[in-house]
Amino acid sequence: MLDKRKFYINGEWVDPVKKNDFEVINPCNEDPCAIISLGSKDDTDNAVKAAKTAFESFKETSKEERLDLLEKLLAIYKRRFGEMAEAISLEMGAPMDWATDVQTASGQAHLEDFIIRLKEFEFDEHFDEKSNNHIYYEPIGVCGLITPWNWPINQIALKVVPAFATGCTMILKPSEIAPISAMLFAEMIDEVGFPKGVFNLVNGDGVGVGTQISSHPDIDMVSFTGSTRAGRLISKNAAETIKRVCLELGGKGGNIVFADSYKNAVRDGIRNVMSNSGQSCDAPTRMLVEKSIYQRAVDEAVDEANKIGVDQASKKGDHIGPVISKTQYDKIINLIESGIKEGATLAAGGPELPNGLNKGYFIKPTIFTNVTNEMRIAKEEIFGPVLSIIPFETEDEAVNIVNDTSYGLGNYLQTDDREKAHRVSKKLRSGCVYINGNAADAGTPFGGYRQSGNGREGGVWGLTEYLEVKTVTGWKN
């Protein structure tokens, strides 16, 4: 079992002030795979003090100096790429192919893109030729970064790298149930030799270190990815000091499949939901199908779901692994059972363990049909491999059903009619709309409407989240 009980504070690996051990569970076998410490207020205060002290000098570094550090970090990340994939597979049960080709690759992609964006970014500019004003972009200060377990290094890179790039200092609190990849990333940062105190890592849970970060008077900004429930609490805690809060929260995406959609639209939609064991906030977990092709779509969806294997993370092949924890497993099973009780038709999967897997948090790819948007499975974020299929007759009806949610992160639509695609995408209330399975390009903004959060991550938008804007008058006089 890995011993990861130290924290990274002020450029050193240090023991926690108070002993508070916590076992990290391998979701494939329910056995402990690592032991960490949950931090106390003293640990958080020490990390904040280090970051606050370091900010005074780090904010004065040049863009070129920060680029040099990030390019060294990228080189180390590439060298230790395999270690990162193994860490992610271990802590969250992701099959090695997925942990390598998607999860770990996402961290490298964000590093590469932020380096490009930083090279192009101007931190000071004239307002316009007729103006006597000048505009500065300055680092906001000490940042508290709270990251989730479902896309660990993806979200760490989306927060840590732009904070570095803009001259901020930071305290990272990764998820306590998937912290191993974060601690490996801290090792890489230490190997680069970032100035002491610029980056600090304190493990802990949301009630402890998470609350301490979001309410700390010396933290200027909090960036959080996780549940909407936790996002509300963080916003309340941060309100006392009026700190900036950037939130990327839950989702309940809709996927509108029109009768003129491309051949494999339904099958691709199923794969999209089930990948990462359904643990993606922008997964299109409500599939809306035009009535004229509804039965065909149901048949394809069930067939595709039944083709998706469920197995151990260590095995090769195109399959999904377990969900992250017993808590998540119980929640998902409860929602599957609620769908059955509320009258939806269980067309594939169900609450029973997959064959041959009697230990671990494994769930079958599950499809419900004859679902209405009032059912719990259509309203609540399940965060597991569960899809609801809902019929519709008209374009406006489909849009209304998709928008009938408190969330607004990612929605999807499938059609061969470009004008219809453009028209519908403008009506959907979400931060992202994906047409015909096309992924977002590197450096595009990611974030949500309404209770899916505020702020944007990625590209130049990700940089500006960590910057204050200063106007200076009389510049030319």
Image (cartoon, rainbow, N blue to C red):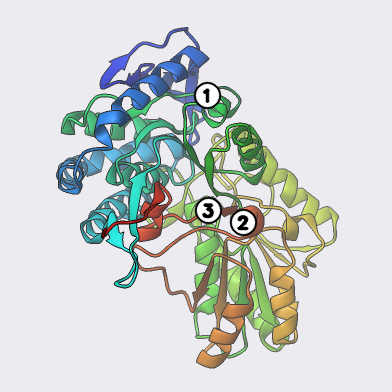
Q: Which of marks 1 and 3 is in front?
A: 1
- Amino acid carrying mark 3 in the image: Ser
Q: Secondary structure beneath disc 3?
A: loop
Q: How far apart are marks 2 and 3 (CA)?
A: 9 Å
Q: Residues at badges 1 and 3 in contact (C-beta under 8 Å)? A: no
Residue lying furthest top? 18
Residue picked out by circle 1:
209
- Amino acid carrying mark 2 in the image: Gly
Residue picked out by circle 3:
280
Q: Secondary structure beneath disc 1?
A: helix
Residue, x 23% and y 34% (percent of image)? 188
Q: Is residue 155 above or below residue 369?
A: above
Sequence-first disc among 1 and 3: 1
Q: In this view, does 463 lie above or below 34?
A: below
Residue picked out by circle 2:
251
Q: Residues at badges 2 and 1 in contact (C-beta under 8 Å)? A: no
